[in-house]
Image (cartoon, grey):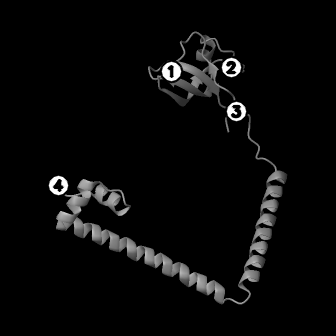
Amino acid sequence: MNRHLSSAEISDWVIGERTPDQERHAQECAECSAEIKRLEKVFSIFRESGQRWADHWHIYRDALPDAGQRSSRWNWLSFASSLATLVMVGVLLLLSPAPHRPPEQAFVRVPYVVPPAPYERTEVMRMEVPVTTLLAAGLEVHVPAVEGTVRADVLVGQDGRALAIRLVSKF
């Protein structure tokens, strides 16, 4: 093997996955051998710190008086309070009135316009549309004066043609 071990190969080495060529190279190459030993030492220190932490808390828990009883009482109290809170939130959600939202009107397809292709981008634009334009497009509009405009959301294709319209009530 002419080259040094890559970081992936060294990681594989540390977890025990190595080829005979890699073993031979690690024995012959001081640089790769030093890197492998350094990583093994780091992981060893990490393992020891985890064991020391677990031993510390295990000893601390055992040193408490009535640790087992206190723990089970605490778990039961914690469970009961969580359950009570959950029930109260559920009751509040069920009893609270839903916010009043006006019903959404659906878009109405503009007659005689080819629908968009599946790959075509569309955009919704809010605008003031003359009532006469809506009537000319074949849409039925009930307004007192045909000279005015109405606020509407217009679905526009990427080529600029109006595909559908939704009238918007004024707030």
Give the position of the C terminus as an image quadrant.
Answer: top right
Mark 2: which secondary structure? loop
Measure the C-alpha gap from mark 2 to mark 3: 24 Å
Q: What's the residue type where badge 1 is placed?
A: Pro
Q: Which residue is mark 4?
A: 3
Q: Which residue is mark 2?
A: 145
Mark 4 vs mark 1, foreground winner is 4
| Left or right of 106, for residue 73 | right
Q: Earlier in the sequence, mark 1 or mark 3?
A: 3
Measure the C-alpha gap from mark 4 to mark 2: 86 Å
Look at 63% across and 26% down and name the residue there: 166
Looking at the rendered structure, which numbered label has been put on residue 118? 1
Q: Earlier in the sequence, mark 1 or mark 2?
A: 1
**What is the quadrant of residue 9 in the picture?**
bottom left
**Residue toward you, 92 or 39:** 39
Q: What's the residue type where badge 4 is placed?
A: Arg
Measure the C-alpha gap from mark 4 to mark 1: 53 Å
Measure the C-alpha gap from mark 1 to mark 3: 25 Å
